Amino acid sequence: MEEKNLRNLALLCSVMGLVLLFFLSAQTEAASIDIDKITIEDVGNAVKICGEITSKRVSNNHIFFDIKDDTGNIKTVIFNTTALGLKNKGIDVYDFKQRESICFTGIVSEYPEGSGRLELIYRTGEIKRV
Amino acid sequence: MIELLFFLLIGCGLGILTGLIPGLHVNTVSLILLGMSVAINPYNIAVIIIAMAITHTIFNFVPSIFMGAPDPSTALSVLPGHRLLLKGYGLEAIYLTIIGGVGAMLLTFMFFPLVLIVIPYIYQNISSYIHFILAAVAAIMIISEPGIRKLYAVVIFTLSGILGLIMLNSLLIPSSFVLFPIFTGLFGMSHLLISLNIKTRVPKQKTTMRPIPRKLILSGIVKGLFSGSILGVLPGLGAAQATVLTQQITRRKNTREFLISVGAINTIVAMFSLVSLYTIMRPRSGAAVAVEKILTNFGFNELLLLLAVAMIATGLSSILLLKTLRRMISLLERVNYRKLTLSIIIFLILLTFFFTNFQGLLVLAVSTAIGLLAPLFGTKRSLAMGSLMLPLIFFYAGIILIV
C-alpha cells in the first residue's frame, strides 16, 4: 500500500476508533453489587453499591465514608481533587450526611497492599443520594 | 545482603531483556512482578524492579541506535545515533549514552542531599502552574516541527489526547491496566508494524573511538540533568519531553553532546521518580508506581536502599554493555529482525488480551492507528504523549475530575 493511502487509512481508523470508544465508554456502567459479594478478585474493577452512610470523615478535603447495605459494610474514599471537581459539577459530596442512603461507584482497592482489607475509591461514574 | 544481590542480578537480567527487545517495556514486566509480590518478599520485588528500570535505561539505546527501534524515551535519539552509525561510529554512540547515564548517576548521588531539598521546592513552586507548563511543553513539541508538520503534530497530539481523555474517564478497562493497551499501541505496536517493512542492516563499525573532550561530557550531563530534573518531577512528563527540551538547549549540530544528554536524562528520570516518591509522595514512572504499591511504608531507608540498588545496577549494566557490545553488534547483524518483530507483536497482543480482554484489544487497535500517524506523517513519536499530557492539562486546570 502506498504511504499516502496508509496514512489516510490510519487517520480514518483513529477517528472512527475514537468515536466507537467514546460511545462504548459512555454506555459502560459499573455492575451493581451487594457489598458482601466484593472480593479480592475484584481489585482494580469498578463496582456500584447502594447503601447507608454509617460514618463520614473529612481529612485534607479527602472524604471517607463507611457504607453499609443489607449484606455488609465497606470503606469508601473520594480524594480531594475529585471531591472538589464533583462540587464544581454540582454534586457536593461534602454535604452527604451520616444515615443518608447513597449509590457509590468505585474502584475496588486493597489497602494496605496485601492486608486483604478492601475499599472503594471513587474515580468516575454514578454517585448520588437515593 | 547476598539475597538482595541475587534479586538485583535478576533485575539487571530483566532490564537487559526489556532494553534490548523493542516494545517490551519496564512497566509491562513491573505489572507482572507486582502480581508476584504475594509470593516473594516485597523488598526483593522492589529491588528487581529498580535494577530492571535502571538497566533498561542503559541497554535500550542498543535497539534504538542499531535497529531504529526506540521506546518513547529514546525515540528522539534515533536520528543522531543513526548519523553516527552510518559513519561507522555506532559503538561510540552507545558509549556516549553510557557516559551520560553513569555521569548522571554520579552527579545525582553527589548532590543527593541537595536533590532532596530541591525536588519539593520545584514541585511546591510550580505545582499550581503544572497545566501551563504542560501546555507550554506541548506547544514547544508542536512548534519544533518544521513547516506543514506543525499541523500534523497538532492532529496527532489532539487525537492521542482525546484517546487519553476517553479512556482515563471510562470504566471500560480496569483503571490499573488502562495505560497498558494505550502505550503498547501508541509506542510499541505502531513502531513494530513499521519496522516489519524496514530492512534493518548494521553497517561495518569502527572498533576505535575518537577522544571525547571533558568539557563536552560535562556540558552534556549538566544539560541532561537540568531537563531531566525539572521534567522528571512533573506528572505526565518524562524522558521523552526532557529530550525535547534538551534539543532546544544543546547545540543542534553537536550529536555527541546530545547523545550524552539523552543518556543522562533516561537515568535521571528513573532516579528522580524514586526521589519524588519519597519527597513529594508522587511516583513519576511505572517502576516507581509499582514500588509504591509494593512498599506501602516507603521511607528514607527504602529510598537509600533503592538508590544503592540503582547505583550498583548502573555500574553493572554499563560494564556489561561495554564488555558485550561488540559481540552484541555482530549478533544483531545476524538476527532475523522480521521474525523477532513478529514474535513481539503476537506476544503484546496476547498480553493485552490477558490483562484487558476484548475491550483492551479495541483500545490497542485504536492506539496503534494513532501511533502509526507520527512515523507516517514524519513527525516526532513523542507527540503521542498527548494521551497523558492533555488529560493532565485538563485535570490540573480543573476541567476533568480524574487522570
Image (tube, coloured by chain):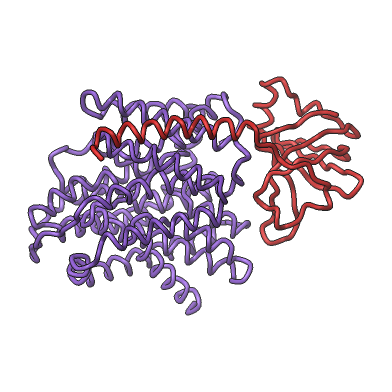
Count of marks overlaid on the render: 0
Q: Nearer the viewer, residue A8 or B55?
A: A8
Q: Nearer the viewer, residue B198 or B33?
A: B198
Can residue B281 be seen here? no
**Image quadrant assignment for residue A97:** top right
Q: Is residue A108 left or right of residue A73?
A: left
Q: Nearer the viewer, residue B401 or B106?
A: B401
The colour chain B appears in is purple
Outermost residue toward the bottom? B2
Q: Position of residue B322 (x, y in %)?
A: 22, 68
Can residue B194 be seen here? yes
At x 49% / y 66%, what residue is drawn?
B47
Q: Position of residue B104 (x, y in %)?
A: 31, 53
Q: Position of residue B397 (x, y in %)?
A: 53, 24
Q: Is residue B325 left or right of residue B369?
A: left
Q: Quadrant of the C terminus of chain B?
A: top right
- The letter of the red chain is A
Q: Nearer the viewer, residue A9 or B70?
A: A9
At x 50% / y 78%, what residue is drawn?
B3
At x 92% / y 45%, what residue is drawn?
A70
Q: Is residue B196 left or right of residue B289?
A: left
Outermost residue toward the front? A1
Is residue B184 shown above or below B230? Answer: below
Q: Position of residue B196 (x, y in %)?
A: 28, 53
Is residue B170 shown above or below B290? Answer: above
